[in-house]
Amino acid sequence: MGRTNEMMNVASPIHRIINGGVNLLFPPRCLACGAHAGLLSDSMCADCASSIEISRSEKACPTCAATVALYEVAKNRCSECRTSKPKIRGMVRVAAYRSTIGGLVRAYKYHARDDLEPFLANWLADALAAALWIDRVEAVVSVPTHWKRRIARPFHAADAIAAHVAKKLGLPHVPLLRRVKAGPHQVGLSFAARIENVRGAFALRRGVTLNKPRLLLIDDVRTSGATLNECAKVLHRAGAGEIYAAIVVHAGFVHQGSKTLEVI
């Protein structure tokens, strides 16, 4: 034991010298903006860390996760979901899409930034820990992608984040759903087209039976809510009990006359 401690004491200064040399040649950057200066312990600069905390603390609707004003929510509904019939009892998010976190999600999904996964997943787990219904959830389900898309891009953000969150919450991550219709990507589609695009796109996996489990459905981005509602509809028809949802970022739509425009 003494010999081990002696070796560790010798190695420690050497490691510090090596790490110092590496940092000198390759200075660490902020994970969000790439700046070298003013990094905090979580590898974010002070400005980005502050921006992230502000966006994480924004008030959101407890049913659809849309950004809301202080007194906009009544009976757990906001102006966006008050007249709808959502299949999901409650939803949490990390932030709005138009935020520093939205940029991190894009980098994670489309630029292979695997280093961002623990941050996004931990923030989502923190949001879930504050949900009044989280103790009711029995299992985590992720929104699936079609097998053709998995061939083109094996990485699937919703699956990876759901697995991380499930482990942190101590819940099973179960593959209950499959996507049976590929269809075009939702990005750029109108509100009505998004609903039609995912109609009949999901099914329960073969051999799965449900006896009213209380489920948490996870996706990375919610815009119209069509994908999450379609997944929840399939799960309810198959025998699921209560269904809740969690997303990393919420995008949304604005209405201008007869047009519905995506907010990104």
Image: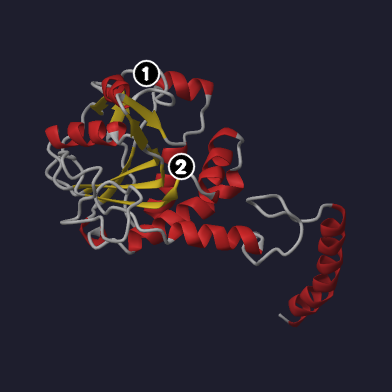
Q: Position of residue 101 (x, y in %)?
A: 52, 49
Q: Position of residue 157 (x, y in %)?
A: 47, 38
Q: Earlier in the sequence, mark 1 or mark 2?
A: 2
Decide if residue 24 is on the left or right side of residue 196.
right
Decide if residue 14 is on the left or right side of residue 162.
right
Viewer-side residue, 137 vs 230: 230
Viewer-side residue, 193 vs 221: 193
How far apart marks 1 and 2 lie (CA) works out to: 20 Å
Residue drawn at (15%, 41%), measured in percent from left and top?
A: 83
How many marks on residues?
A: 2
Judging by the rendered image, the residue that carries numbered circle 1 is 182
Judging by the rendered image, the residue that carries numbered circle 2 is 160
Vertical relation: 57 (above or below) 177: below
Vertical relation: 15 (above or below) 254: below
Q: Viewer-nearest of labels 1 and 2?
A: 1
Q: Dot 2 lies on which element?
A: helix
For the N terminus, the quadrant is bottom right
Decide if residue 233 is on the left or right side of residue 54.
left
Residue drawn at (32%, 53%), measured in percent from left and top?
A: 68
Residue drawn at (40%, 58%), measured in percent from left and top?
A: 58
Quarter of the image holding residue 199?
top left
